[in-house]
Amino acid sequence: MKNYNILNNDYFCFTMRLDIITVLPALLESPLSHSIVKRARERSLAEIVIHDLRPYGKGKYRQTDDYPFGGGAGMVLMVEPVYRLIEELKKERTYDEIIYTAPDGLPFTQKEANRLSCLKNIILLCGHYKGVDQRIRDHLVTRELSIGDYVLSGGELAAAVITDAVVRLLPGAMSDGSSALTDTFQDNLLAPPIYTRPANFKGWEVPEVLLSGDPEKILEWQEKESLSRTERLRPDLLDR
């Protein structure tokens, strides 16, 4: 399938493949089976495969976690099951990134979503419990991403967020592909306010310029509002 990537103006001929490794696959089934992600999967723009880590666990009970060396609370995902599954996947294809979702990873941004949307094969490893054995991070993972400065019960929801943000950028995933170019954060600015019908509701009126039909004036207003909102709500973005 030949697609046109609106973010880098280049043609590419492949279906993006995302392999997600988790101990709780049911957590991901619903978030990745609706809306734009569902449409992308149905159109063969993205192939998303959720892998249950437990069959790769040790012993009779398929153990995937153990107590941390040195003591302390919480359980840690073991290196062997993760290694076995990743090595099995790597026999089938070459991966551009093996990403671990972690609260102490690099901040996941729109810029990073843009970059990932141009890759072909990606593994997303979901942490759980207290995290994963550090040797996984040192030797198997190529990138660590965080969706915010807080801790979740596991990395599954973070993986769903990253997948959604990336897949929606694939050509053909959205009805109007150019919509992604005007999203908040694409140019390190917040998007301007948006309105729809009716033009007047309970005396709450749509700005007159948006009803003028003058593209130049509308664009000027949008740029001004975008900058104003960013200065007021997210001044940190302007430093970038």
Image (cartoon, grey):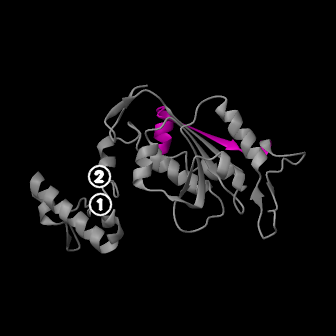
Sort mark 1 into few (<14), some (14-19) or many (20+) by Cα contacts within 10 Å.
some
Does the magenta portion include 12? no
Circle 1 — which element? loop
Bounds of the magenta span? 36-55
Up/down of 186 relative to 177, above or below:
below
Marked residue nearer the N-terminal end (2 or 1)? 2
Residue under label 2, please give it.
Answer: 182
Quadrant of the drawing holding the C terminus = bottom left
Sort mark 2 into few (<14), some (14-19) or many (20+) by Cα contacts within 10 Å.
few
Does the magenta portion include 42? yes
Name which residue lies at 83% across and 50% down: 63
Identified by mark 2, the residue type is: Thr
Name which residue lies at 62% across and 64% down: 152
Q: Answer with left or right where residue 177 lies relative to residue 143.
A: left
Q: Indicate which disc residue 191 carries.
A: 1
The answer, for residue 25, to whether it is visible in the render is no
